[in-house]
């Protein structure tokens, strides 16, 4: 059974940092692209960033709104995905989802974690 | 960036109705489009990918069509568990983007 379990959310002041983790199980982690998607309270979905699979050297992509502030990484030995968030802004307040992408030519988001809430406020 | 515009934003329907919603892309994305269903307080669920391929385990009353810039999600006979918000998402180019959503409500 595929499982994605996020942790690390919480309240942080503007300008602060936070590191989200996602523990995965039930599939071969290194085979899949992995993403972070967020949802501000009462709003729609926003893609945050991606790490490709081992075959593609775990390269990354980011949304313009977070590029240079957020870093997606993974530890294959621990089956874990991370999102390092620096210079946080109030607009970063959202539920952050860890998401697995399919093994297809255009990877779509086929499994989602339950989400972890990040609140940026003074 | 590719913008996705969903219409309508809200849709009132009854159980048994045939429901159709649209997603328009600001430029051609071939068939690189997915549809997701989200219920309050829950993570989204993949319904359709590559514009028309039904995800495993998704009921056959859901179908998708379209290519290029115009796409449609149809629910052939609305069931009580289908009241939710539906999002489209393009996977043609970075940054990956979502539409603003269509909320299906009970009439």
Image (cartoon, rainbow, N blue to C red):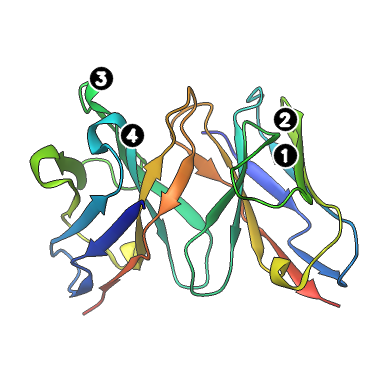
Instruction: Determine the chain carrying the residue at label 2.
Output: B
| Element carrying mark 3 | helix
Q: Which percent across, then down, holds residue A112?
A: 41, 54
Is A96 situated left or right of A81 in this image? right
Residue B13 lies in quadrant: bottom right
Mark 3 and mark 1, same subunit? no
Q: Mark number for residue A33?
A: 4
Q: Is residue B14 above or below residue A61?
A: below
Q: Residues within 10 Å of mark 3 (few under 14, many from 20)?
A: few
Instruction: Determine the chain carrying the residue at label 1.
Output: B
Q: Which residue is mark 1?
A: B24
Closest to the observer: A99 or B88? A99
Disc 4 from disc 1: Cα separation: 26 Å
State yes or no: discs 3 and 1 in contact (Cβ < 8 Å): no
Q: Which percent across, then down, holds residue B39?
A: 58, 69
Instruction: Determine the chain carrying the residue at label 3.
Output: A
Mark 3 and mark 4, same subunit? yes
**Marks 2, 4: nearer the viewer:** 4
Q: Mark number for residue B69?
A: 2
State yes or no: discs 2 and 3 in contact (Cβ < 8 Å): no
């Amino acid at each position: 059974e595929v499982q994605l379990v996020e942790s690390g959310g919480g309240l942080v002041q503007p300008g602060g940092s936070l590191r989200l983790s996602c523990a995965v199980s039930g599939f071969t982690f290194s085979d899949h692209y992995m993403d972070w998607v967020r949802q501000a309270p009462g709003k729609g979905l926003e893609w945050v960033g991606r790490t490709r699979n081992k075959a593609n050297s775990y390269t990354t992509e980011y949304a313009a709104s977070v590029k240079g502030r957020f870093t997606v990484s993974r530890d294959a030995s621990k089956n874990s995905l991370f999102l390092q968030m620096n210079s946080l802004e109030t607009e970063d307040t959202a539920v952050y989802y860890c998401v697995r992408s399919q093994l297809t030519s255009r990877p779509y988001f086929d499994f989602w974690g339950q989400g972890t809430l990040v609140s940026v406020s003074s | 960036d590719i913008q996705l515009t969903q219409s309508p934003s809200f849709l009132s329907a009854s159980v048994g109705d045939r429901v159709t919603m649209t997603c328009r892309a600001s430029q051609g994305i071939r068939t690189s489009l997915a549809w997701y269903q989200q219920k309050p307080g829950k993570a989204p669920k993949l319904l359709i990918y590559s514009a028309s391929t039904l995800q495993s385990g998704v009921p056959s009353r859901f179908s998708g069509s379209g290519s290029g810039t115009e796409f449609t999600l149809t629910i052939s006979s609305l069931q009580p568990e289908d009241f939710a918000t539906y999002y489209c998402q393009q996977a043609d180019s970075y940054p990956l983007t979502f539409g603003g959503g269509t909320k299906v409500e009970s009439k």
